[in-house]
Amino acid sequence: MNIAILHYAAPPIYHALELMRAGHAVRILTGSGAEFDPRAQVTVVPELGSRHSDVLAVKKQLDQGQVTTDFNALRDRLVSLLSDTLVGVDALIAHNVFTLHKSLPLTAALYDYVTTRLPDHTTILAWHHDLAWDDPRYADDVHDGYPWDLLRTPWPGVRHVTVSASQQDRLAALYGVSLEQIAVVPPGVDPARFFRWTDVTQRLSGELGLLDADVLFLLPARITRRKNVEMALRILAAFRAQTRLEARLIVTGPPGAHNPANAAYLQSLLDLRRDLGLKEVAHFLYERDWLRSSP
């Protein structure tokens, strides 16, 4: 599928990466930003942003309740731009343009495009973060009538997404529609990028399927009897049984090297892990041979 993402500024990188990972072709339309991945086509058009001089000049007029020829000219210019750049797109995801007033010429242009020029095969998704009509901070910036009413009216044929259940409630009230007409998709996070994982951490996460877990128990200790590792195994088994959550245990250290009795202790832990049915979810990292040679 060919997907376009429209954003005022700074390409929504994680969103695009996940869509490309799923096999889709992605192009991004933004008022400012830069290329971040050779697979994504990034088109920077300053007039799409909220800080362009023409946009700011028109906003100053709009804030005073004036819809001028400057507004109409900028809107029509943006309609042509959208029509040219969205050729061949199967789905358009637009962030905040539908309910935020930062560039009403763009909102009006997108409305014209959606209602008069949209190809039959193209799906429009409105991704809502902020609602101008529902925010006291913007009370002086919105006025009754066109184009401000576009920000509180559900457009025909558009699918709506909010980033939280509370935002879903607010948008449903603003639009006067049922909750079922609005999907909730929380913002995604790339754990490796966000937490700055090392290559070792990323490999462990992939091999052990740690991102599939609901809960992770971490025991950062060597495998010696005084660490009471068997208690951790029993806690894991009880927790999984009582909560039905996908919980995992990670024991980071190797078997103790100085006490000959540690070998027998290790075997008793492996037997207990087997007996409790935890072989696939209780991980002793010393079992990963490649870790021993990692820096």
Image: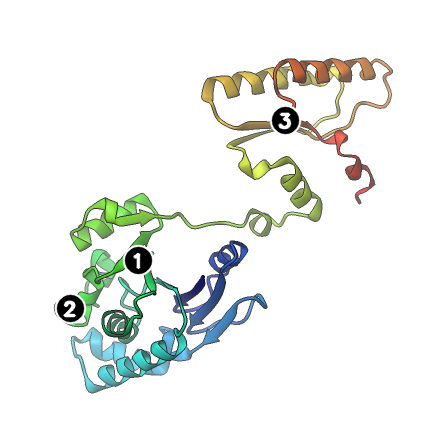
Marks counted in the figure total 3
According to the picture, the residue beneath numbered tag 3 turns out to be 280
Under tag 3, what secondary structure? loop
Mark found first going from the N terminus, 1 or 3: 1
The x, y position of residue 132, in whole percent, is 24, 61
Residue 51 seen in the figure: no
Mark found first going from the N terminus, 1 or 2: 1
The image shows residue 95, relative to residue 278, as above or below, that is: below
The image shows residue 255, relative to residue 20, as above or below, that is: above
- Alpha carbon separation for disc pair 1 and 3: 43 Å
Label 2, residues with CA under 10 Å away: few <14, some 14-19, many ≥20: some
Name the side, left or right, on which 274 lies relative to 133: right
Q: What residue type is labelled 1?
A: Asp
According to the picture, the residue beneath numbered tag 1 turns out to be 130
According to the picture, the residue beneath numbered tag 2 turns out to be 143
- Give the quarter of the image for residue 271: top right
- Alpha carbon separation for disc pair 1 and 2: 17 Å
Q: Which amino acid does label 2 sit on?
A: His
Front label number (1 vs 3): 3
